[in-house]
Image (spheres, rainbow, N blue to C red):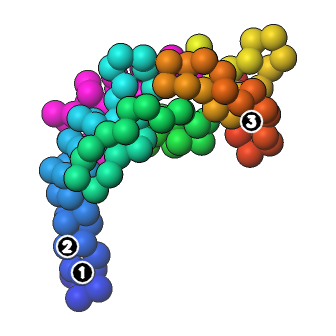
Amino acid sequence: MNEKQMTLKSTAKEMREILSNKMLPFWLDKSIDGQYGGYLTRIDENGNVNAGMNKMIITQTRMLWGFSALKDFAPEKYAGETEYAARQGYDFLIKYFWDEQNGGFRWETTREGVSVDGGKLVYAQSKI
């Protein structure tokens, strides 16, 4: 193994340890909105959650993607938690962001899921 390969292997190991021991436990603990579903995304550097903020389609879908993608990368001990996090985020997205009457995803809801901005921006649309 050459020096470049050793550096890449070492860096990958360090990144996996940071993900497993710091990032994943932090986001699983702080971001899942156990009361209303979806994700709380306004969290400061001290881990304080601003639970009164609205939920935006972009941050909700990014969190959903992240927790879904982690099933392939996270240590086995987090498998059930990442699956739960992804499922409850998906359920909130479909229940509150999807516009059954007109199609498309709303831009913003309250924490509870009440539509605040029903606008449909191309950036946030996909076919489900």
x 26%, y 24%: residue = 80
Q: Position of residue 87 (x, y in %)?
A: 43, 21
Q: Position of residue 39 (x, y in %)?
A: 43, 32
User: What amino acid is labelled 3 in the image?
Assistant: Gln
Residue at the spot x=28%, y=56% of the render?
45
Q: Which residues are magenta?
A: 73-93
110 in the magenta segment: no
Q: Main secondary structure of the magenta part?
A: helix
> Residue 96, located in which quarter of the rendered image?
top right
Q: Which mark is residue 74?
A: none
What residue is shown with label 3?
A: 125
Q: Quadrant of residue 52?
A: top left
Report the quarter where the C terminus lies. top right
In the image as oriented, which residue stretches furthest toward the bottom? 3
Nearer to us in this view, 1 or 24: 24
Spatial CA span between label 1 and label 2? 5 Å
Check residue 10 in the rendering and tell me which mark sits there, or answer none.
2
Write down the residue under mark 1. 7
- For this orientation, the residue located farthest to the right is 102
The secondary element bearing badge 1 is classed as: helix
Give above or below for 100 relative to 18.
above
In contact (CB < 8 Å): disc 1 and disc 2: yes
- The amino acid at mark 2 is Ser
Q: Residues within 10 Å of mark 3 (few under 14, many from 20)?
A: some
